[in-house]
Image (cartoon, grey):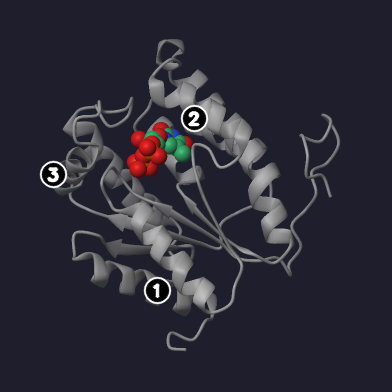
Amino acid sequence: MTTTGHPASGESRPKATPARGRFVTFEGGEGAGKSSRVAELADRLRRRGFEVVVTREPGGSPGAEAVRRVLLSGAAEAFGPLAEAILFAAARADHVDQTIRPALMRGAWVISDRFHDSTRVYQGATGDVPADRVAALEEIAVDDVRPDLTILLDVPVEIGLARAAARRGDAVADRFEKEEEKIHERRRRAFLALARGEPKRFVVVDAAQDPATVADAVWYGVCSRLGLAEKD
Ligand code: TYD
């Protein structure tokens, strides 16, 4: 198994076996509460005795975190949406190879705050990168490491943006947070369309509800889809 550095070009990447751990991704717009819900789910799974790796995108490995800084600072914006999509894919390939695949292969649960659906929505559906390019980059970056389950935290745009602004306080909005409300609305609809297209992979949770109710809905979704008993 290659755990350091990328395999040389042409060399195939190690495959995750069917006995691998579980891979859960969280998606949603700004202020959906993903990071808190991710942390709560990880706690619940750890209490069941599972090894859980919590990670995020862009980022999740040292190389990908370096690319994250470039992307969120807006430094790559001038190069255009395709270049940004390529950078997200480069970060994702490193994240998959260095963090996600090794964890799955040792049987851990991996919970990622965003994954490839964010590229489909932010760079694809609402970002001008043609769908075939997004699909080609996804194939390269993700390879066979597909989520078993994706929780879409759906929240009306005005609520999400208000929460994101409150969380940010005096800090400046990042490259993606500062975009217009209209585009956030299109993203919300694009995420919901992805969920309708892959109903077996997605669970859509109404994230405008109070945090405890959302956390319970996430837990129910994980247990029912991935075969865990809801109660200890
Ligand atoms: P982050 O601070 O992690 O925000 P959030 O709490 O919303 O997840 O910033 C990540 C930003 O990057 C977010 O605005 C979505 C954007 N993004 C993309 O545009 N494409 C991608 O593939 C990913 C993973 C994120």
Which residue in the structure is indicated by mark 1? Answer: 219
- Judging by the rendered image, the residue that carries numbered circle 3 is 158
Image disc number at residue 68? 2
Can residue 196 be seen by looking at this rendering?
no
Q: Nearer the viewer, residue 105 or 89?
A: 105
> Within the image, what quadrant is residue 205 found in?
bottom left
Residue 49 x, y percent position in the rendering: 58, 77
Identify residue type, mark 2: Arg
Mark before the other along the chain sequence, 3 or 1 = 3
Q: Please name the residue shown 72% across and 53% down the image.
A: 102
Q: What is the spatial separation of the Cα atoms under label 2 and label 1, in whole angstroms?
A: 29 Å
Q: Is residue 109 above or below residue 182?
A: below
Residue 88 coordinates in the image, percent (x, y): 52, 31
How crowded pointer 2 is (Cα within 10 Å; few <14, some 14-19, many 20+) is rated as some
Kindly tell me whether mark 2's CB lies below 8 Å from ligand 1.
Answer: yes
Badge count: 3
The residue positioned farthest toward the top in the image shown: 78
Height in image: 170 above or below 99?
above
Say left or right for 123 vs 205.
right
Q: Report crowding for label 1: few under 14, some 14 to 19, many 20 or more residues within 10 A (C-alpha).
A: some
Q: Secondary structure at mark 1?
A: helix
- Amino acid on which the number 3 mark rests in the picture: Glu
Comparing 16 with 53, the one in front is: 53
- The single residue placed furthest to the bottom in the displayed view is 232
Q: Which callout, 2 or 1, points at the residue further toward the start of the chain?
A: 2
